């Protein structure tokens, strides 16, 4: 980061000396994950092509990023010209008038975006954020262990079949746990997985009157199954594990199966990172009584706050960083294995990408299968699969996530966790005026 800023300053001084006009500096808030860090490294390529624009990066851990950008956009602080936001925030913020529409043109080719993702980032027919990468949830499992156990994993397994597989390959003495799943509390941590389980077991967050439905038979079945599965075949200390911890375990060969974001597949299949890269197979996220809402949908996106005074330059950058040409640029620099996925149909159609991405078909099927407005068997008033697109959901999801983590660690029973969660959610919804 320091060297990039230094290079930008050197270039700016040189052009100023040549009598060039002063350029526009864009301040970009982003998250500290691999794809975004790679985008920062390509700053010189953007600035060379657009010598009147310089980029200043503010890179933050996910939780801090959410807090900073939410505060800034709600107060119209104008601190950032481009923000990295999730698919959860986009419909809420665009409805409030906090985001500027993305000025799509023929070169940007919005029709190339995967339809589900384009729909999730649009409001009243306009795109309000541009997807940088996207993901569904899938099952990643050890094909070598399945073969050894004589187990044939279906392309579309049930949760019961996944439990059967976990029971057969669970061998703690050999350092292999049957299954790894998220346990760390948070609306975007354990609740991302648990919500998809509640959905596919026939549950929902809220009924059509916005009353919480957490303390119900469907949630009891789902959470009971989750806790029993993890206690029997999961790794020790699972209530502290989220994506990164489970990724490390899987890459070390310590997980028989893992249900999580499809973006993980590009890491577990990379021999530079994974000891089991050549032993992994992929299937759809497991289902129970209904396929609805069994796989989640998430995207990280670039959006332009209404408070930005540099909207024209911001539009140029956002379209560059989320274009087909950007994907090609990353492929040229680091190979097709490194490109951001889950956004454009042209990426999945590329023969070079297909050669190195054994997970591509499973990932695209997962994303294509999602309906953001029909993710539960009972009719629900909200959009979202593993989240509910209302401002109150963050607080509710965090509180419920803490209860689910406590149930997993044995501090409370599943029944106690669900009862407490129901009370917490009911209190929050009443306070916000959804009902009396």
Image (cartoon, grey):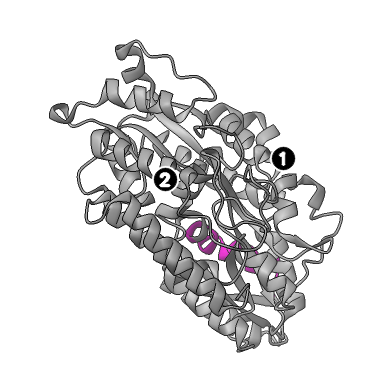
Check the image and report above or below for 68 versus 404.
below
| Disc sitting over residue 220 in the figure | 2
Percent of width and height locating residue 431? 54, 79
Q: Is residue 15 left or right of residue 262?
A: right
Percent of width and height locating residue 19? 71, 88
Dominant secondary-structure state across the stretch colored magenta: helix
Percent of width and height locating residue 53? 67, 76
Name the residue located 54 percent from the left edge and 66 percent from the top edge.
393
Identify the element where label 2 is drawn.
helix
Q: Is residue 183 left or right of residue 192?
A: left
Q: How packed is label 2: few (under 14 Cα within 10 Å), some, or many (20 or more)?
A: some
Residue bearing the label numbered 1: 345
Residues drawn in magenta: 37-51
* Image quadrant containing the C terminus: bottom right
Percent of width and height locating residue 398? 42, 65
Check the image and report above or below for 150 versus 124.
above
* Image quadrant containing the N terminus: bottom left
Q: Which residue appears farthest toward the right when viewing the image?
A: 106
Name the residue located 58 percent from the left edge and 33 percent from the top edge.
360
Nearer to us of marks 1 and 2 is 2
Ranked by sequence position, the earlier of labels 1 and 2 is 2
How far apart are the two marked residues, 1 and 2, measured between alpha carbons? 38 Å
Q: Which residue appears farthest toward the left when viewing the image?
A: 173
Q: Is residue 276 left or right of residue 79?
A: left
């Amino acid at each position: 980061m320091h060297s990039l800023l230094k290079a930008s300053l050197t270039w700016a001084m040189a052009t100023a000396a040549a009598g060039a006009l002063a350029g526009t500096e864009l301040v970009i808030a982003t998250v500290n994950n691999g794809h975004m860090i790679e985008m920062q490294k390509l700053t010189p390529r953007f600035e060379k092509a657009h010598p009147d624009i310089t980029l200043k990066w503010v890179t933050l851990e996910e939780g801090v990023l959410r807090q900073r950008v939410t505060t800034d956009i709600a107060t119209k602080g104008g601190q950032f010209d481009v923000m990295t936001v999730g698919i959860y925030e986009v419909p809420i913020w665009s409805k409030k008038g906090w985001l500027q529409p993305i000025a799509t043109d023929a070169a940007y080719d919005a029709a190339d975006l995967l339809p589900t993702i384009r729909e999730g980032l649009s409001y009243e027919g306009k795109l309000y954020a541009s997807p940088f990468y996207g993901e569904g949830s899938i099952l990643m499992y050890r094909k070598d262990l399945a073969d050894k156990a004589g187990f044939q994993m279906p392309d579309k397994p049930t949760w019961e079949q996944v439990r059967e597989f976990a029971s057969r390959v669970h061998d703690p003495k050999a350092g292999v746990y049957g299954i790894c799943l998220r346990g760390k509390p948070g609306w975007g941590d354990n609740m991302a997985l648990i919500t998809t389980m509640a959905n596919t077991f026939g549950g929902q967050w809220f009924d059509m009157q916005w009353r919480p439905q957490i303390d119900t038979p469907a949630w009891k079945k789902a959470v009971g199954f989750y806790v029993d599965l993890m206690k029997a075949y999961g790794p020790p200390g699972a209530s502290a594990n989220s994506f990164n911890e489970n990724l490390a375990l899987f890459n070390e060969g310590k997980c028989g199966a893992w249900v999580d974001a499809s973006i993980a597949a590009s890491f577990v299949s990379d021999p530079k990172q994974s000891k089991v890269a050549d032993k992994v197979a992929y299937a759809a996220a497991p289902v129970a009584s209904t396929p609805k809402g069994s796989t989640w949908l998430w995207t990280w996106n670039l959006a332009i706050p209404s408070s930005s005074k540099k909207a024209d330059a911001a539009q140029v950058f956002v379209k560059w960083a989320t274009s087909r040409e950007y994907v090609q640029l990353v492929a040229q620099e680091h190979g097709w294995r490194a490109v951001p996925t889950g956004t454009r149909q042209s990426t999945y159609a590329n023969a070079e990408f297909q050669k190195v991405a054994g997970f591509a078909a499973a990932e695209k099927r997962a994303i294509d299968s999602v309906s953001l407005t029909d993710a539960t068997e009972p009719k629900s008033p909200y959009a979202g699969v593993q989240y509910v697109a209302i401002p109150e959901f963050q607080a509710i999801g965090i509180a419920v996530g803490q209860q689910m983590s406590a149930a997993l660690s044995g501090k409370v029973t599943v029944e106690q966790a669900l009862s407490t969660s129901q009370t917490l959610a009911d209190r929050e919804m009443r306070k916000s005026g959804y009902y009396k």
